[in-house]
Image (cartoon, coloured by chain):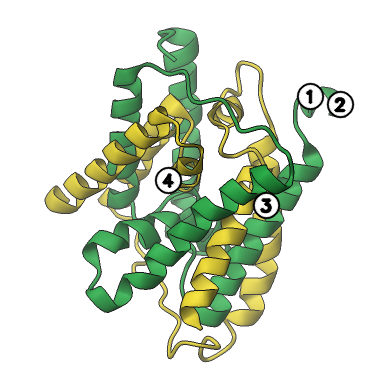
Amino acid sequence: MLENLFAGVNVYYSVTGGLLIGLSATLLLLFNGRIAGITGIVFGIFSQPFGDKLWRWLFLAGLIGGTLSLHFVMDMPIPKASNESLPILIVAGFLVGFGTQMGSGCTSGHGVCGISRFSNRSIFSTVLFILFGVVSMLLFRHGMGVI
Amino acid sequence: MKNLIAIFAGLVFGIGLSASGMTDTSKVQGFLDVFGSWDASLLLVLGGALGTTLITFRFLLKRKTPLLAEVFLLPLKTKIDRPLVIGAIIFGVGWALVGYCPGPALAALAYLQWQTVLFVVTMLLGAFVAKRIA
């Protein structure tokens, strides 16, 4: 039963990766007093005053650099690019940007940091976006067959 | 020093996302595909992250100030309002369509795949439009 549930899942890597994300959020809050919400950090590059921009760029550079270095150091294969169609990629990107900006956060800001602050907004948001993700998957993959 | 923490936190976050397979859109779509061939990876990642922050945040939010800044900059809103609800729903739909939320999409720019670049460009456009009209 448990083997079936975790078929194709590297439990060790998944949990370790999660711990690292938790460590990153802890460092950013403990030292800089900032919430490690990707939406807030990166979208803020375009809306925050000049003095509040540099650390956001650096965090983003680290995010990309960390990903790049992992695949070099650990000899892990680079994941295949999404095979969704051009219109789906465009629409999905727009919806994710629009929704996370409007809803004040994404999986990191609401799902990790917000829940850990016991924020009722974040708990509600996380349940809602996972629920609608599951329903959309059912509709678009198994119902309409477009993804 | 704060900038050094920012880049280090970014590095650790990026390593965490890619090591756990979250930059692989098929794994994230697999997590949402509860009625197909379900992939539990994302649940374990969220569990690992929450297992850490649920504990650490208890201690560090008891502090009056962070170590390097004057104040903790925490979200001020507490009410569940319409933008939160509509935003989360729209995000959920877009998330399922490709399997990218903002973090993994930006981290995966490292792979220089045009699909990811296109996704990130339209994501930033979507955020820009939301900021204008919402």
How far is the residue under mark 3 from the one under mark 2?
A: 21 Å
Residue B106 drawn at (x, y percent): 44, 46
Q: Is residue B63 toward the left or the right of residue B114 in the image? A: right
Q: Is residue A24 above or below residue B85?
A: below
How far is the residue under mark 3 from the one under mark 1?
A: 19 Å
The chain to which mark 1 is attached is: A
The chain to which mark 4 is attached is: B
For mark 1, what is the residue? A7
- Secondary structure beneath dot 1 equals loop
How far is the residue under mark 3 from the one under mark 4?
A: 16 Å
How far is the residue under mark 4 from the one under mark 2?
A: 31 Å
Residue A39 drawn at (x, y percent): 38, 54
Q: Which chain is green?
A: A
- Secondary structure beneath dot 4 equals helix
Is residue B46 in view?
A: yes
Looking at the image, is mark 3 or mark 2 nearer the viewer?
Answer: 3
The circle drawn on residue A18 is: 3
Residue A84 drawn at (x, y percent): 42, 18
Do discs 1 and 4 belong to a common subunit? Answer: no
- The residue lying at 44 percent from left, 9 percent from top is A143
